[in-house]
RNA sequence: UCCCCAGUAGCUCAGUUGGCAGAGCAAGUGGCUGUUAACCACUGGGUCCGCGGUUCGAGUCCGUGCUGGGGAGCCA
């Protein structure tokens, strides 16, 4: 006999005989002559109420079932005589698979997020984290669906790389050399002795790989883990996070911005439609305005403005900022927050940044001062997407690499793409966890990834 | 890496001027009840983050370290 998931039973239109469920006990309440057991199997936020009558042969054991115990229930799905739920299961048989001792750390009451991080292996058993990780799963699916529906191909970019990909942050070294007996050559570590015969790192971005495939398959995307060894202590940074990186051939910056906006709207709508119950939990307990904010994002156009006009607005705002703003300086968190939370009160796309503050691969505009870059900013989170039109002209790309002292030899294969059939192309990177924060209202990135990796924290 | 805050029961916290270690919840036991973050009663539960110092006496004051949180930078 096959088990039925609780999500299916709760949606049932009619009673059903002989159903089988398997799950974990959230709480048990005794009445005279019977016991109510709330069972959750992870298929949805809601529990199903099981009524176990004292006539059951193992009732003395049943009345000792504790929170966190695993059970298998056979019985009939019947309309509940109580208020508060439509269906319940009248049990024929309650098998106690595993009884949780009273040291089980999760209570029926709410815990703080800080405490739950210390038991990250158990927190998905709570309502909030169960909901968060179901939404994470749905959102992953929605990303693949979004791209597939639009003819994009999914590329598995490498996790281990030999180049430092644009210098986007500190790198994690990958090596098989034992640190206690490193062979040295001229005082430097001799990486010729290492597994790959040269230095290797964990990827910080799949972009360069994605560009190569965009110039072959047209429209592509990557969706995978990336690693930054930054010593960041904020609620928006982790050392291991997932990034979505589309890359499109024959596409300029405007097409890039269009895709970014369409994608965020699509994904927001998808979760509003597909994860109603889970989303409601966040609207109720985490951010009262969540649904309104999401509806607003899904239905209204993002504000687009150039970096230059953003700077003008900030200068004219009359607001005193900790960091001065002037053309050529990067926007600070306080500037981004002012623009997206106070001035426009909606998602923004800022484009055409000064080339001095952006990486080498971004296409230089005709003014020779700015590059075709764009950032998407959302209220509370800040930057959620960073992207650009890529420099497709070999001579200009080489000149920029020279300017910042990059090795053209190392990137010979990247430059090859500009030698053979080079075309204008664009792409961006979306921080998957940041999008998840935006959609759920969860304010700490450590709470939207199953086992967060941060400085000094690798348990679990 | 820098700035700020915190660390007391399983959890969330209180602890006055330096003078006997506390509450609510959770847990255990009993009772009651178609209950539903159930209710009532009782019971057990402490390395007051570590180390050092001041003092007759330190949860409380001083120094230092560790851990957690918030913010900044870096970025997604």
Image (tube, coloured by chain):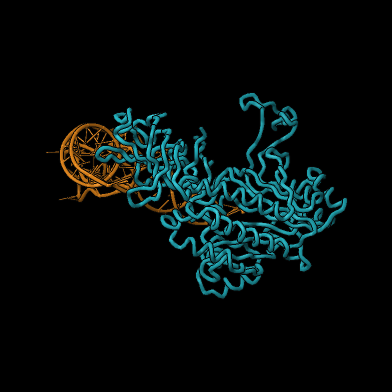
Q: Quadrant of residue A371?
A: bottom right
Task: Name the residue at 55% across, 60% down.
Answer: A333
Task: Name the residue at 70% across, 54% down.
Answer: A149
The percent coordinates of residue B75 (x first, y second) are: 62, 53
The percent coordinates of residue A172 (x first, y second) are: 63, 39
Q: How many marks?
A: 0
Task: Name the residue at 67% across, 61% down.
Answer: A374
Q: Viewed as shown, does residue B20 lie left or right of A276?
A: left
Q: Quadrant of residue A354?
A: bottom right
Question: Toward the viewer: A253 or A409?
Answer: A253
Q: Quadrant of residue A260?
A: bottom right
The percent coordinates of residue A393 (x first, y second) are: 83, 57
Question: Toward the viewer: A159 or A268?
Answer: A268
Q: Viewed as shown, does residue A123 lie left or right of A84?
A: right
Q: Viewed as shown, does residue A147 lie left or right of B25?
A: right
Res A382 visible? yes
Vertical comparison of A281 with A368: above or below: above
Q: Residue furthest toward the top?
A: A181
Res A442 visible? no
Drawing shade for chain B:
orange
Task: Name the residue at 72% across, 45% down.
Answer: A155
Q: Residue furthest toward the right?
A: A420
The percent coordinates of residue A291 (x first, y second) are: 49, 61
Question: Toward the viewer: A270 or A456?
Answer: A270
Question: Toward the viewer: A236 or A328?
Answer: A236
Drawing shade for chain A:
cyan
């Amino acid at each position: 006999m096959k088990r039925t998931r609780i999500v299916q039973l709760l949606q049932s239109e009619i009673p059903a005989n002989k159903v089988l469920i398997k799950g974990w006990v959230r709480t048990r309440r005794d009445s005279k002559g019977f016991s109510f057991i709330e069972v959750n199997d992870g298929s949805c936020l809601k529990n199903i109420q099981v009524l176990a009558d004292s006539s059951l042969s193992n009732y003395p054991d049943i009345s000792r079932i504790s929170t966190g115990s695993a059970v298998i229930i056979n019985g009939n799905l019947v309309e509940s005589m109580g208020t508060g739920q439509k269906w319940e299961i009248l049990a024929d048989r309650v098998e106690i698979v595993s009884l949780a001792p009273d040291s089980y750390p999760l209570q029926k009451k709410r815990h703080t997020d800080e405490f739950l991080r210390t038991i990250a292996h158990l927190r998905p058993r709570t309502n909030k984290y169960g909901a968060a990780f179901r939404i994470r799963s749905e959102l992953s699916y929605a990303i693949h669906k979004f791209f597939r529906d639009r003819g994009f191909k999914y590329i598995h970019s490498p996790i281990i790389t030999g180049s430092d990909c644009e210098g986007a942050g500190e790198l994690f070294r990958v090596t098989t050399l034992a640190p206690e007996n490193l062979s040295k050559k001229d005082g430097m570590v001799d990486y010729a002795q290492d597994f790959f015969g040269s230095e290797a790192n964990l990827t910080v971005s799949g972009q360069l790989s994605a560009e190569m495939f965009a110039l072959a398959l047209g429209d592509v995307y990557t969706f995978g883990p990336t690693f930054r060894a930054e010593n960041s202590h904020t609620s928006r940074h982790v050392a291991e996070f997932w990034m979505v990186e589309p890359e499109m051939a024959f596409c300029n910056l405007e097409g890039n911005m269009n895709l970014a906006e369409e994608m965020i709207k699509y994904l927001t709508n998808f979760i509003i439609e597909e994860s109603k119950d889970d989303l409601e939990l966040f609207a109720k307990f985490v951010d009262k305005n969540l649904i309104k904010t999401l509806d607003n994002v899904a239905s209204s156009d993002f504000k687009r403005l150039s970096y230059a006009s953003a700077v003008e607005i900030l200068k004219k705002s009359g607001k005193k900022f900790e960091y001065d703003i002037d053309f050529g300086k990067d926007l600070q968190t306080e500037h981004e927050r002012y623009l997206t939370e106070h001035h426009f009160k909606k998602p923004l796309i800022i484009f055409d940044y000064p080339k001095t503050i952006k990486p080498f691969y971004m296409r230089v505009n005709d003014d020779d001062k700015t590059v075709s870059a764009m950032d998407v900013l959302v209220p509370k989170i800040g930057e959620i997407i960073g992207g650009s039109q890529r420099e497709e002209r070999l001579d200009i790309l080489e000149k920029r690499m020279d300017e910042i002292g990059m090795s053209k030899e190392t990137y010979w294969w990247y430059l090859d793409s500009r030698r053979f059939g080079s075309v204008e192309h664009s792409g961006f990177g979306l921080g998957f966890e940041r999008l998840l924060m935006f959609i759920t209202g969860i304010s700490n990135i450590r709470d939207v990834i199953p086992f967060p990796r941060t400085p000094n924290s690798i348990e679990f």
